[in-house]
Image: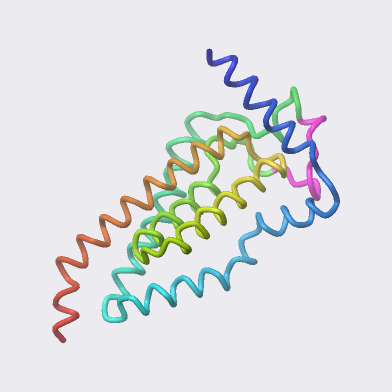
Amino acid sequence: MLEQLETLDRQLLLLINGANTPFLDTLMWTVSGKLVWIPIYAALLYFMWRKAPKNWWILAISICVAILLADTVSVHAFKNVVCRYRPSHNLEIQDIIHLVNNKRGGLYGFVSSHAANMFSIATFVSLILIKRWLTITMFVWAAIISYSRIYLGMHYPADVLCGALLGIAAGAVAYKLHQFLTEKYGKQANEV
């Protein structure tokens, strides 16, 4: 059973990675970058601040916890423990996958930190702002970034799927922390 899942995972990777074009190379490289999203992050922080200006510090702590939890767990509990080679470092397929800008990434890829981080942000923001259009937008955004990691040959689909699940859990934990801190300390800030 595990062998069949591994084979399916590899076939999906090769299908997605093999459907490359110069336009998609540029688009996926850009989407996968971190700096390009800074204006979006700033806008999200602004909208969350507007929701609770007196308790901005609770939002700041909670979103940092979401990202740190997703990122730390993805690396220390998965990548450094499972030690599954990224497709770009897998000797069996590294010569047949398409790499953009010769980027190979780190040695291990299970689970995808990009997916974990993006889905933690998407989950947390969706639970805080509770707007259907925003929830859909956030999860589509996280999915596109996660897809770009497969397209670029940095991760297998299972790496991304498990990273997304980890991110959703981290975002939910951060939301619970936000609720706790708001109940405990938020009222005092609202009374001032």
User: Residue 80 at what x, y percent from top left?
Assistant: 50, 35
Q: Residue at x 41, y 47 (%)?
A: 168
Q: Position of residue 141 (x, y in %)?
A: 57, 56
Q: Quadrant of the C terminus?
A: bottom left
Q: Does residue 4 sit above or below 143 in this rendering? A: above
Which residues, given as a range, are shown in magenta?
94-104
Residue under the point 14% across and 78% down = 188
**In front here: 155 or 72?**
155
Please identify the residue farthest to the front as the structure is shown: 132
> Residue shown at 79%/47% (left/top)?
100
Q: Main secondary structure of the magenta part?
A: loop
Which corner quadrant of the image does residue 99 belong to? top right
Above/below status of 183 relative to 47: above
Q: Residue 68, position in %: x, y?
A: 41, 54
Q: Quadrant of residue 10?
A: top right
Q: How is the image coloured?
A: rainbow
State the residue at coordinates (33%, 51%): 172
Using residue 83 as the reference point, say whether residue 185 is left or right of it: left
Residue 27 horizontal side relative to residue 106, left or right = right
Tell me if residue 166 comes above or below residue 4 in the rendering.
below
